[in-house]
Image (cartoon, rainbow, N blue to C red):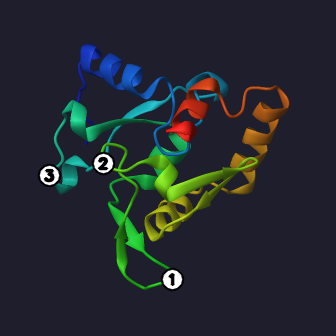
Amino acid sequence: MSQHIPAALRRQVWERAAGLCEYCLLHERDDWVGFQIEHIRSRKHGGRTTLSNLALACLDCNMAKGTDLGSVSRASGLLIPFYHPRRDRWTEHFRLQGQRIMPLTETGEVTSRILGFNTRPRLLKRQAIAMAGRYPSIEALAVLRD
């Protein structure tokens, strides 16, 4: 069930994310669909509609994540939580290699696989944006330097 998120809170989430999907680092201006404000820990699992539990997400990442909190690691067979934009550093779990987002940890692996970071359509989209000289964006480069 959807819950209304006040405009001021939406603006805070967008500004904190600098217009980037907090999962795949795509900038909203480079996507065909506006980004969504998503609950990192879904309401279904007790997540609240607070700034600390909200993230800016592209439609691809948000739809793939859904209400899931994690997945089973292919390496260990253990249930591993997804990358958490408020607690984790992106560069500790992922590395950008060309247009491909490479996982560095089990958290990175389950997040990348379930959210579909490197599916053919998403790679082609990032390649087209890169050919236009906009990928990674200035905002994404700041995260990558962090």
Badge 3 or badge 2: first in the primary sequence: 3
92 relative to 13, above or below: below
Marks counted in the figure total 3
The front one of 92 and 65 is 92
Tell me if label 3 and label 2 are in contact, CB under 8 Å.
Answer: no
Instruction: Tell me the distance, in whole angstroms, between the alpha carbons under discs 1 and 2.
Output: 23 Å
Residue positioned 73% across, 47% down in the render: 99
The front one of 111 and 59 is 111
Whole-percent x, y for residue 22 in the image:
46, 39
Residue picked out by circle 1: 75
Whole-percent x, y for residue 13 in the image:
34, 26
Badge 1 or badge 2: first in the primary sequence: 1
Badge 3 or badge 1: first in the primary sequence: 3
Tell me if label 3 and label 1 are in contact, CB under 8 Å.
Answer: no
Helix, strand or loop at label 3? It is loop
Residue 6 visible in image: yes
Which of discs 3 and 1 lies nearer the camera? The answer is: 1
Mark carried by residue 46: 3
Quarter-of-image position of residue 85: top left
Residue positioned 51% across, 81% down in the render: 74
**Identity, as a three-letter code, of the amino acid under mark 2:** Arg
Residue positioned 53% across, 26% down in the render: 34
Residue positioned 47% across, 55% down in the render: 92
**Identity, as a three-letter code, of the amino acid under mark 1:** Ala
